Amino acid sequence: MKVLGFDENTELGQITEEKFDRVLNANEDLENRGFINLRYENEGLINNVSLTLKGYDLGRKYSSTLGTAWVWCNEYKFWVILALIISLIGVLVAIFKD
């Protein structure tokens, strides 16, 4: 049995009810936020999972180190600029100290 959030090689005995509930809750939250589409069939089990455009864009943003760094810089741009200014002042002071 293949369940979203678990390895293909995961045996049924290794999937506890708590873990299964956490995966189902995470899937529902992602669907409610518009990141994925879930299609249910046969006894309410998930049959198909697909990304929405919003989910795809979010995945692309965090798929590389550069993308993650860019998101981080946009979030904390004031602090990044302040750190660069302080570093520049420190370098100038070190150079012209003598």
Image (spheres, rainbow, N blue to C red):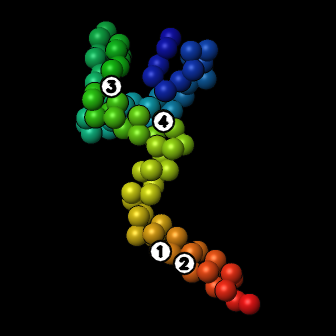
Disc 3 marks a residue whose amino acid type is Leu
Could you say which disc has been placed on residue 82 in the image? 1
Pointer 4 residue: 63
Q: Residue at x 30, y 22 (%)?
A: 38
C-alpha gap between disc 3 and disc 4: 15 Å
Q: Which residue is mark 2?
A: 86
Above or below residue 54? Residue 70 is below
On residue 51, the disc is: 3
Give the mark toward the camera: 1 or 4: 1
Between label 2 and label 4, give the one nearer the viewer.
2
Q: Label 1 neighbourhood size at 10 Å, few (<14), some (14-19), many (20+)?
A: few
CB under 8 Å between discs 1 and 2: yes
In the image, what residue occupies the spot 28% across and 17% down? Answer: 39
The Cα atoms of the two marked residues, 3 and 1, are separated by: 38 Å
The kind of residue on which mark 1 rests is Leu
* Image position of 37 with respect to 43: above or below: below
Q: Secondary structure at mark 1?
A: helix
Give the mark nearest the N terminus, 3 or 4: 3
